Image (tube, grey):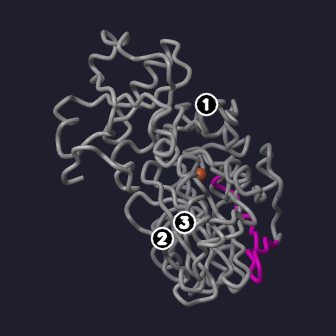
Amino acid sequence: MDASVASAAISLAAAAGGGTLLFRQLFDADTGTFTYLLADVLSRQGVLIDSVFEQHSRDLALIQELGIELVASLDTHAHADHVTGSWLMHEATGCAIGLAAAARAENVTRPLQHDDRVAFGTRFMDVRSTPGHTDGCISFVLDDQSMAFTGDALLVRGCGRCDFQQGDAHILWRSITEQIFSLPDACLLYPGHDYNGRTVSSVAEEKAFNARLGGAATERDFVGHMQNMKLPHPHKIAEALPANMRSGKPRQTEASSAWAPVQRSYAGLPELAPAWVAAHLPDFTILDVRSPEELQGPDGHISGSLNIPLPQLEQRRQEIPNNKPLVVVCHSGSRSALATQQLLKEGITTIANLRGGLRRWSDEGYPLAGSGAL
Ligand SMILES: [Fe+2]
């Protein structure tokens, strides 16, 4: 562990609410995906389940702040709706990448089978094979069977679709009834997704109320329901599936650009973290693409920045000096992302978007000239 992080390490027991197991449920609003962090307080070893590529910095920051030694980044299956953050986490922490061997994905260092055990410190997860949504779905059951992480096999009052990725409703029925409903009634169930604000359920609840297979539903009822859902394909499937078959390893690895520790978002946008920009401010031209009114308004601006509003960028391109790398900023990082793309196309190579825009810059405590209420 980095010494500065270690020295700042807080009591993990306190972070865990006084218990012996730290548990965090994280959420990616864009894809409705839950990511779970569990850590053994005694040893500080932990596992991450179903991370999201775009949330890597968030997850890594949490792991480092809490001083957790990540043993493995696990996925319940090869997702079709988001790219896993496992490869990034492996690169950042050296953790194992765990996925069902049946998924046959690249870069997996810990291929998992039914009945495998993933240990973290004094705790462990049991692996249960729960195919049907995909043929490589697994669920993770905590050692004392108080919690299970079911991925998309079983969702709160629902379940994953069975109409692609070798899905099969008959197989999913067996997985859920034999592998999940066989857990104690009081076992809490944590799903891979939810789009309606539901975060957790229990075996007893799902047995009673799951609309598709709870109550008196039979296998025939369930299969009939699943075969008639006619869902549109997830909009990210074309990028997500191939990327997940590489465990989330980006196609081109931008290991480190010579001029700055630029990170690429999965969309391919070069980004710099506020902390790095703040520490090297004189080395850059800061291009602010907001309107002059916003620049002079209460949000403030980075001192010395060059203001060219996004709609004028094409005509005023010559005003950008070419003696320094460029960091493009706006309020949230969205207009500046567009400007960065535009300037990349025009051949500027030493350029990056300020991640999270001026809002994050300000949230992280970096100075803004003329700032009022931000
Ligand atoms: Fe899925």
| Element type at mark 3 | strand
**What residue did someone put label 3 on?**
191
User: Is the CB of mark 1 within 8 Å of ligand 1?
Assistant: no
Of tags 2 and 1, the one toward the viewer is 1
| Type of amino acid under label 1 | Trp
Q: Does the magenta stretch include residue 22?
A: no
The mark that comes first in sequence, 2 or 1, is 2
The mark that comes first in sequence, 2 or 3, is 3
Q: Distance of mark 2 from mark 3, alpha carbons?
A: 13 Å
Residue 115, image quadrant: bottom right
Classify 278 as above or below 48. Answer: above
| Type of amino acid under label 2 | Asn
Range drawn in magenta: 117-133
The dot on residue 250 is none
Residue appearing at x 54%, y 72% in the figure: 24
Classify 255 as above or below 279. Answer: above
| Element type at mark 2 | loop
Residue 176, image quadrant: bottom right
Disc 3: CA contacts within 10 A as few (<14), some (14-19) or many (>=20): many
Q: Is residue 132 magenta?
A: yes
> Left or right: where does residue 223 sit relative to residue 367?
right
Of tags 2 and 3, the one toward the viewer is 3
Q: Distance of mark 3 from mark 1, alpha carbons?
A: 42 Å
**What residue did someone put label 1 on?**
259
Nearer to me, 270 or 230 = 270
| Element type at mark 1 | loop
User: Is the CB of mark 3 within 8 Å of ligand 1?
Assistant: no
The dot on residue 210 is 2
| Type of amino acid under label 3 | Pro
Residue appearing at x 27%, y 44% in the figure: 369
